[in-house]
Amino acid sequence: MDEQAKAARHSETTITELMIPSYANFGGKIHGGILLSLMDKVAYACASKHAGTYCVTVSVDTVDFLQPVEVGELVSLKARINYVGRTSLVVGIKVIAENVKDGLVKHTNTCYFTMVAKDDDNKPMVVPKLVLETKEEVRRFLQAIIRKYLKTQHRKEMEDAKSKFEIDDMIKKLEGERCVIDLKE
């Protein structure tokens, strides 16, 4: 096996934290920003373990808040490397909240952080290859490639649409939407 390759299991990382009252938003639920901060921490820990160096977050894909997290619950953030490029890594994160009183466990979030490894001069650094040991790991790696492709296509389509912007066409497309057009030009 390639000595520069590492299995995902070697960098799996779980952070568990008690949700305290100061983490709550005005609605009494745990603030999404708190959860995002914890996700960023676990993504960094997982990516850095695989890369063997400092890693930075370059993007976060699709953070869906599936269920609210309550004060008093234990939140576990489970991270693993799903994909590696030359200098980048995609970390898949699953967030689970547990009410220890009633034993209720719920899946609250799944998301993907793209991280880039940095050397001592803050330049992107080549990361070890990923050893895929299970069918599930093969599936995750391929899905990450598909998400990367779709993201690139979406970015290109948005740039193309921006360059072809015609106000009269856009106004027609907004008919039936919940907006009021009141141009001052």
Image: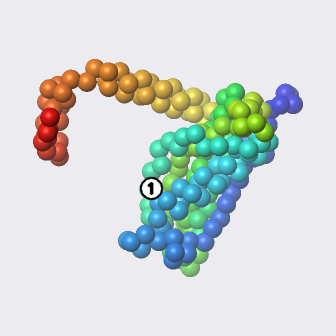
Residue at horizontal 14%, vertical 26%? 168
Rendering coords of residue 83 (x, y %): 65, 34
Where's the C terminus, which quadrant?
top left
- Residue at image location 68% in from the left, 57% down from the top: 14
Q: Amino acid at mark 1?
A: Phe
Report x, y in % for residue 5: 80, 32
Q: Specify whether 40 is left or right of 68.
A: right
Q: Which residue is mark 1?
A: 65
> Image check: 42 left or right of 180?
right
- Toward the viewer: 132 or 81? 81
Q: Position of residue 109 (x, y in %)?
A: 51, 54
Q: How many marks?
A: 1
For mark 1, give the secondary structure.
loop
| Residue neighbourhood size for the residue with mark 1, other residues' Cα within 10 Å, grouped as few (<14), some (14–19), many (≥20) | some
The answer to whether residue 48 is above or below residue 155 is below
Q: Residue at x 65, y 43 (%)?
A: 56
Which quadrant holds the N terminus? top right
Residue found at the very far front of the displayed protein = 185
Taking the spot 47% from the left edge, 30% from the top edge, the residue there is 151
